[in-house]
Image: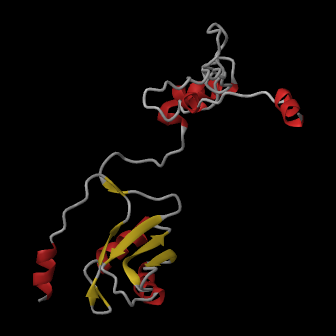
Amino acid sequence: MAAAAMNTDVEAVDFDSDDDDLMDEEGAIEPSPAPAPRLRSTIAGGGGGDDDAPRKTKGRGFREDPNSSSAHRDSRLAGAGRSGFDALASDGGPGPVRSIEGWIVLVTGVHEEAQEEDLHNIFGDYGQVKNLHLNLDRRTGFVKGYALIEYENFEQAKRAIRESDGTELLSQIISVDWAFSSGPVKQRNTRKRRKLQA
């Protein structure tokens, strides 16, 4: 009897294995998840339900407020054009242009083992060298093959170009010209120079 009393307290559950395997069946339809609510972006202003609200934007390209401080700056720059900025005067024709600090001469064909002292010895004869850049290759440690020499005076730089162009430095012929010029680059005839030295 005890066994019969136990059976009355226990409920029998009918478990059908076919109903549980819906995910394994090929024709099973998965319930679609509920659509996520659209979030309103404070940067681009999209996503909200009411489209009449003012669009908030950030960044340079979005400034349209005429009362903003940036609108004043933009109009000031647009109206001034290039005349509102500092510029070096130019006579309009082709020729050398002065850099901010002085007249810069470009020396090419510099030997890879040349030292700053070698260039100072040659170009110091034409005037006081205000600055000299002799760039080195990071990988090899040798000179890259060019140097920038700065003179305070136009005449000194012009004389250095005229007298040292085509001369020899450490068994190599160097070419000397203006580093900055306004106008077309003049075509050099290097064949003539080589024939004259041969």
At x 67% / y 10%, what residue is drawn?
53
Q: Is residue 43 left or right of residue 77?
A: right
Residue 88 percent location from the top left of the image: 47, 49
Q: Is residue 188 left or right of residue 77?
A: left
The quarter of the picture where the C terminus appears is bottom left
Colour mapping: secondary structure
Q: Check the image and report above or below for 156 versus 49.
A: below
Which one is in front, 7 or 73?
7
Which one is in front, 28 or 46?
28
Q: Quadrant of residue 39?
A: top right
Q: Quadrant of residue 113?
A: bottom left
At x 40% / y 48%, what residue is drawn?
90
At x 38% / y 65%, what residue is drawn?
179
Q: Check the image and report above or below for 171 versus 45.
A: below
Residue 44 percent location from the top left of the image: 61, 24
Residue 55 percent location from the top left of the image: 64, 17
Q: Residue furthest front?
A: 1
